[in-house]
C-alpha cells in the first residue's frame, strides 16, 4: 500500500512507550500479515490507551489492512469515523477511501479540495493531486462529466507550476481525451488525444499508442475508415516490442485494421489481422463474449468468401462464434448468427452440422415464444 509510508507515519511515536509494539506492527505490515497487524493494533489501543493522535494513526493502518483482506465495510466504517471525528488531513483520508469506496472518497475529497481552495493552499501540486484523485473516483463511478471537470482542474495547476511536470501534463491530456471518448464526444476526444500524439515523443509510447488506437476506433465508429487507417498503421508499428504488445490495445488495433479491409471487401488482407486479434483475445482474462463472437463471425465470413476459400477453418470459426454468443444475453444477435451458420452448413452440404444448429435455432425460438 503506497498511500502511507508507515515509518514516517509513526516516526513521532517511535521514541514513546509504545515503540516495541509499533515496531512489531511495522514488521507485520511489511510482510503483508494484515490480520496480525489488526490484532496487535487493537491490542495496543485497548490495553495501552495511547493519545488520540496515535489512536487515529493506528486506525488508519487498520483501515488499510481491512481493505487489503477484502473487509471493505470495516475499512469504510473506520475512514468515515476518522473523517467525522479526527483532525487527520482530509486529502489523506480521501486517498484511503479510494481503496474501498469511491462514493466515500468523492465525499471526503470534495471537502478537501474545497477547504484548500478557501484557504488559498500555496502547494498547488498538492491541490492538483486532490483534484486528480477526485477525478479518478468520478471516473470509477462513471460520472464522466465531473471526471473531465476535475481532470481539467488538475491539468491547469500542473501547467501553471514553475517547473511543469511534462509527463503529468501529457497523462492528463490522455485522461481527458479518454473521458470524452467514453461520452462519445468524438471531436473533443480527438482534440486532446491528438495533443498526446504530438507531445509524447519516444519515451511515452504507451500513451501514444493508446491515443492512436482510440482515435482510429473513433473514426471507425463514424464509418470513416480511410481516416482511421494511418493511425492504425502507426500504432501497429509502435506496438512491436512495446509493453502493450499482445495486450488489449494490440488486439483492438488488429481488429480495427481487419475491419478496415473487411469493409473494403479485401477479405484475404483482413484474415491475418483477424487471426492475430483472436489469438490475443483468447489469452486475455476479460474478453467480452459478444465482441469475440462477432470477430469470429467476421473472420469466418472472410475465410468462406475470400478467393482461396478455407471452408474447414470457416466452419470452425462459425462454431466458435456461436459458442461465444450463446454466453451473451443478446438473443437477437444469436438468432441472426445462427441463421448465418445454418446457411453456411447448407451451402457447404454439411447436413449433420446444419441440423445441429437448426435444432438450436428451433429451441431458442420456442423458448422465446413461451416466455
Image (spheres, rainbow, N blue to C red):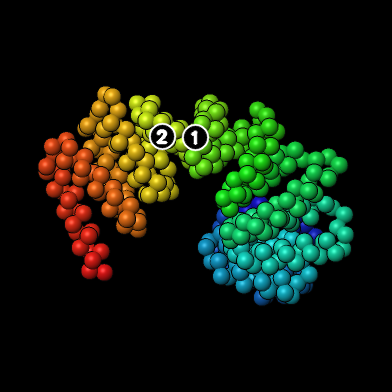
Asked if residue 271 is positioned above or below residue 1 in the image, the reply reads above
Task: Give the residue drawn at x 30%, y 44%.
Answer: 321
Q: Quadrant of residue 104?
A: bottom right
| Image quarter of residue 89 | bottom right
Outermost residue toward the top in this view? 308
Which residue is disc 2 drawn over? 263
| Residue in the foreground of this view, choosing between 111 and 223 | 223
Of 5 and 78, the residue lying toward us: 78
Residue 57 position, x and y percent, is 72, 65
Look at the numbered disc 1 and give the secondary structure of its residue: helix
Circle 1 is placed at which residue position? 225
Give the residue at x 88% y 59%.
120
Q: Quadrant of residue 40?
A: bottom right
- Identified at 77% across, 40% down, the residue is 165
Instruction: Name the one closer to the observer, 283 or 34.
Output: 283
Q: Residue 98, labelled with which disc?
A: none
Name the spot of residue 142 as percent of width and height, x first: 58, 59
Percent position of residue 181, x then y: 58, 48
Q: For the point 65% across and 34% down, which residue is it?
A: 197
Residue 145 appears in the rendering: yes
- Quadrant into which the C terminus falls: bottom left
Labels 1 & 2 near each other (Cβ < 8 A): yes
Amino acid at each position: 500500500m503506497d498511500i502511507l509510508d508507515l515509518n514516517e507515519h509513526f516516526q513521532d511515536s517511535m521514541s514513546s512507550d509504545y515503540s516495541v509494539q509499533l515496531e512489531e506492527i511495522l514488521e507485520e505490515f511489511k510482510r503483508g500479515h494484515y490480520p496480525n497487524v489488526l490484532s496487535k493494533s487493537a491490542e495496543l489501543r485497548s490495553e495501552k490507551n495511547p493519545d488520540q493522535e496515535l489512536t487515529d494513526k493506528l486506525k488508519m493502518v487498520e483501515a488499510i489492512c481491512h481493505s487489503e483482506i477484502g473487509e471493505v465495510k470495516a475499512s469504510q466504517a473506520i475512514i468515515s469515523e476518522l473523517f467525522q471525528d479526527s483532525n487527520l488531513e482530509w486529502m489523506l483520508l480521501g486517498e484511503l477511501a479510494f481503496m474501498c469506496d469511491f462514493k466515500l472518497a468523492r465525499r471526503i475529497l470534495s471537502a478537501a479540495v474545497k477547504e484548500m481552495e478557501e484557504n488559498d493552499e500555496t502547494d498547488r501540486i498538492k491541490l492538483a493531486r486532490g483534484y486528480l484523485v477526485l477525478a479518478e473516483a468520478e471516473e470509477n463511478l462513471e460520472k464522466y462529466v465531473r471526471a473531465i471537470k476535475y481532470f481539467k482542474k488538475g491539468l491547469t495547476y500542473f501547467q501553471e507550476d514553475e517547473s511543469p511536470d511534462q509527463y503529468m501534463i501529457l497523462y492528463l491530456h490522455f485522461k481527458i481525451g479518454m473521458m470524452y471518448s467514453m461520452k462519445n464526444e468524438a471531436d473533443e476526444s480527438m482534440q486532446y488525444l491528438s495533443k498526446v500524439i504530438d507531445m509524447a515523443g519516444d519515451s511515452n509510447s504507451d500513451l501514444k499508442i493508446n491515443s492512436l488506437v482510440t482515435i482510429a476506433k473513433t473514426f471507425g465508429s463514424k464509418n470513416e475508415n480511410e481516416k482511421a487507417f494511418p493511425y492504425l498503421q502507426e500504432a501497429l508499428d509502435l506496438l512491436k516490442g512495446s509493453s502493450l504488445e499482445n495486450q488489449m490495445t494490440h488486439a483492438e488495433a488488429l481488429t480495427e485494421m481487419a475491419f478496415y479491409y473487411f469493409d473494403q471487401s479485401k477479405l484475404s488482407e483482413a484474415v491475418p489481422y483477424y487471426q492475430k486479434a483472436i489469438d490475443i483475445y483468447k489469452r486475455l482474462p476479460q474478453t467480452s463474449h459478444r465482441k469475440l463472437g462477432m470477430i469470429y463471425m467476421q473472420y469466418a465470413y472472410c475465410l468462406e468468401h475470400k478467393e482461396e476459400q478455407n471452408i474447414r477453418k470457416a466452419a470452425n470459426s462459425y462454431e466458435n462464434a456461436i459458442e461465444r454468443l450463446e454466453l451473451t444475453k443478446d438473443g437477437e444477435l444469436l438468432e441472426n448468427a445462427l441463421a448465418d451458420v445454418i446457411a453456411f452448413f447448407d451451402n457447404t452440404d454439411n447436413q449433420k452440422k446444419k441440423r445441429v444448429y437448426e435444432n438450436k435455432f428451433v429451441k431458442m425460438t420456442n423458448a422465446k415464444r413461451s416466455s
